[in-house]
Image (cartoon, rainbow, N blue to C red):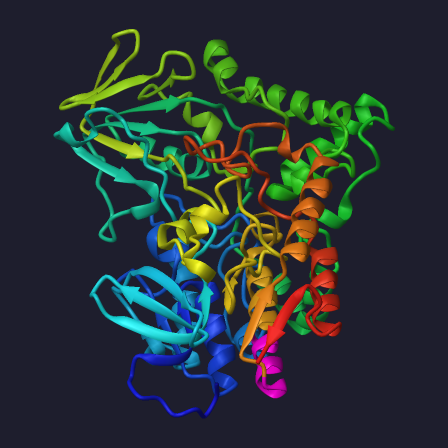
Amino acid sequence: MPGQQRDTERDFDAVIVGAGLAGLYMLHRLRGMGFSTRVFETGTAIGGTWFWNRYPGARCDIESLEYSYQFSDEIQQEWEWTERFASQPEILSYINHVADRFDLHGNIQLETRVEQARFDEAENRWAIRTNAGHEYRARFCIMATGCLSCRNTPDFKGLESFQGESYHTGDWPHEGVDFHSKRVGVIGTGSSAVQSIPIIAEEAEHLTVFQRTANYSVPAQNKPLDPAVQSRIKADYAGFRERNSNSFFGTLGDFENAGPSAKAISPEERDRFYEAAWKRGGVPFLNTFDDLMIDKESNDTAVDFICHKIREIVDDPEVAERLIPRQTFGCKRLCVDTDYFSTFNRPNVSLVDVSENAIEEVTPSGLKLADGDDFALDAIVLATGFDAMTGALLAIDPHGKSGVTLSEKWSEGPQTYLGLAVSGFPNLFTITGPGSPSVLSNMVPSIEQHANWIADCLGYLHETGHERIEATRAAETAWVAHVNEVANGTLYPKCHSWYVGTNVPGKTRVFMPYLGYAPYVEKCNEVAANGYEGFELSR
């Protein structure tokens, strides 16, 4: 604990895995409390998601003034955002600015992958082994590994034989990619594809999009950030943040402007609501009406509106029909785009449906479908997403008490208490883990809330002389049941998505995020106020 003598430079109070937004703030909090702390980061630089995801058009779908740290009013006031929705380069610059401002680099070990974390019950310490073969020891192990950081690369037959260039959107070359005069194939139509396809289409000689599942997307309506708007918010940033914290998703945008039930008004009035939300742009379209994610009949009205928009935008009726989603609106991550649907009006863009006529194999010169159709390609872009929420944790596969691994513990799906801790794994914390609002919230406030809770918890343990904390099995079981009960009262679990893990072959189908930022924060505060109720503390 703070001030304790160390035998070597490999013994710490806390080890943090990951140097993205979560790992950096966690480091800042613990270092300020006097805890000796080391951060391990696989990449050659900090930034996490925003270091790796450099594909064309990569940007955030939460407004810049909200998708930012709030722990430092100085940072809030001095940083000037340039766009309503910040791009990847701007967000990465912001992250580096924060790290420089608080001199965080010295506690971060780059190009270091944690390969194993094992709990030593006799010493109440975690043994952390890296890819360099070194072992580090720490009282606490904090996983800041990110919810969307473990790439999902399909096991296509012959992928290694392809003689052209291949890329995954989650591991994009830092020097960029030139697609001019090339025949490009994009596999996938999720968020990264929706953002990158319009830009790749402008460069490529020909772009073929291989779509398995059509996705809903609404326009971002991105634009330069009005300096007057930024100044007005900065004049009352504390109030702005407070209003955010009391909202269901931890973000305002225009969520507070929800209308009544979509069924309660005339079709003409309902369309006026939808049209206004479409012109406003962004994820808040989900909340045009209060009951869109609760009532299927209301949800169907949003489906009808967006399908009409797609048919209106896309010139070729057959292509338009292939682009129309067939699942419940919003039960998969809602995409936010700039000119996605209109891109399919370009003469150099083709859409291929592989939902039934699947990709059979990658050949040296392109792709072959099950029916024998061949596509000659110079470059393949795998926009195939991530093993969300659990992938990065299971890649490390921590060993808890009695040598039980996390993969064994989670063989039937992730089980946590508050998305913060796992029974059987003492002194291990997960920032925005499964069972917390995470991906169904504004991630930066969620990260700060978790890091603050963990820091306060470690401070409490130090003050009270406790060396060990572990979630009880009973509390964990009750929390998992509660997460599922809340989710099952909505339409979110009703379709195949990475929210439930069905994008990864063999992954157990479980709805992983917790729905409701404000009630979740209230529960976490209640647990701490009651002496960390649901945890077992020991000396």
- Magenta-colored stretch includes residue 461: yes
Residues 279 and 384: in front is 384
Residue 235 placement: quadrant = bottom right
Residues 465 and 289: in front is 465
Q: Do we see residue 375 in this rendering?
A: yes
Residue at the top extreme of this rendering: 371
* Residue 143, image x, y percentages: 45, 62
Kindly identify the residue that appears in the image at 46 percent across and 74 percent down. 124
Q: Main secondary structure of the magenta part?
A: helix
* Residue 265, image x, y percentages: 86, 27
Tell me where the magenta segment starts and ends, as one range. Answer: 455-465
Vertical arrangement, residue 8 with respect to residue 482, above or below: below
Q: Do we see residue 390 in this rendering?
A: no
* Residue 57, image x, y percentages: 39, 44
Residue at the right extreme of this rendering: 264
Vertical arrangement, residue 304 with respect to residue 292, above or below: above
Kindly identify the residue that appears in the image at 39 percent across and 59 percent down. 48
Kindly identify the residue that appears in the image at 57 percent across and 38 percent down. 510
Vertical arrangement, residue 28 with respect to residue 444, above or below: below
- Magenta-colored stretch includes residue 139: no
Kindly identify the residue that appears in the image at 80 percent across and 22 percent down. 267
497 horizontally vs 256: left or right: left
Residue 206 placement: quadrant = top left
Vertical arrangement, residue 146 with respect to residue 5, above or below: above
